[in-house]
Amino acid sequence: MPKGRARRIGTRSMIGSVVLVALAWMMAGCAVKSTHQASSVVQYLYPHKAEKVEEPSIPTLNLPLRVGVAFVPEESRFARFHLSEKDKMDLMQKVSAEFRSYPFVKTIELIPSPYLVPGGSFSNLDQVRTMYGVDVIALLSYDQVQHTDEGILSLSYWTLVGAYLVKGEKNDTSTMLDAAVYDIPSRRMLFRAPGLSRVKGTATLVNVEEQLRLDSLRGFHDASEDLVGNLRQQLEFFQEKVRTQPEEVRVVHRPGYSGGGSIDGLSLGILVALGGACWWIGRRCRT
């Protein structure tokens, strides 16, 4: 066989092998990696399924409220990333700012993570209540999943330049934040609000870890923005529930507190009606 022909056959064979490898990679859906990190209010408050669950009672809210905000302990010890204490404090500041806008809230305490122990349950919350003087606490938990998909562009990683310049890694980060507000003495959940986000991005092989960390933080930030909006709505619903269903929640005013200057719709309607009646009576007397 002539050498030129043999060389052409060898070249075609090599090209065919590369094409087959590429097709096999595409058919296999390329390599997909997933990581998961989470914390759970249920696991924190009710860690032992066999034990008897405490029956909640009707809560008595002492106005103005003293509220605590805290992250429950994480479950994923071997997760790729963990929220730092600074990141948690920043997120708790956003939630506490929403509570501060209401006149029936007196103080907000941000509880550092070390004060909540894994599986600490309500006995741990009783300790936090004693230390910080709070009766109501917003427990923050989260669930975040990150998927990394090596797309067809990742074939360029066979070259050194491709690994540094070509963004062949497709990242998908889904995040859920949840705020569950509990009255500690009664063990009753007053209300909850979720926050959701989804971040899509790309990265090179070299900086994929750095990009995933940035996507993770952005996911928490976006979810916290969504949570704050939902928390505002749930606080309004809770105010209405307290007003219309007094059998569900008892309200007691602390000495010296008269309502913080706020007047609900019912009280305003009564005042308007009384004012109108007085005006009508006064006019009748003058005539």
Image (spheres, rainbow, N blue to C red):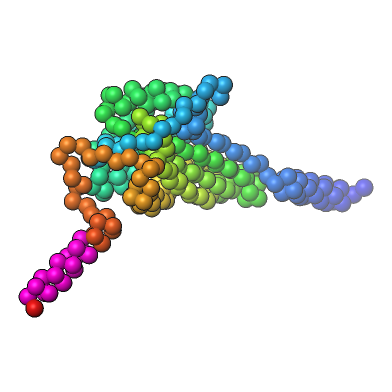
Q: Position of residue 231 (x, y in %)?
A: 38, 48
Which of the 4 quarters of the picture holds residue 179?
A: top left
- Left or right for 269, reference 157: left
Q: Position of residue 136 (x, y in %)?
A: 33, 35
- Left or right for 256, reference 73: left
Is residue 57 in view? yes
> Is 280 within the magenta?
yes
Residue at the image position 61 percent from the left and 39 percent from the top: 33
Which residue sits furthest right? 1
> Is 241 within the magenta?
no
Residue at the image position 18 percent from the left and 51 percent from the top: 261
Q: Give the prevailing secondary structure in the magenta stretch.
A: helix
Q: Position of residue 77 (x, y in %)?
A: 50, 26
Residue at the image position 38 percent from the left and 23 percent from the top: 124
Which residue sits furthest left? 286
| Residue stretch in magenta | 271-286
Q: Position of residue 213 (x, y in %)?
A: 46, 40
- Left or right for 252, reference 76: left
Which residue sits furthest bottom? 287
Is residue 220 in view? no
Q: Nearer the viewer, residue 197 or 71?
A: 71
Q: Nearer the viewer, residue 196 or 153?
A: 196
Residue at the image position 23 percent from the left and 54 percent from the top: 263
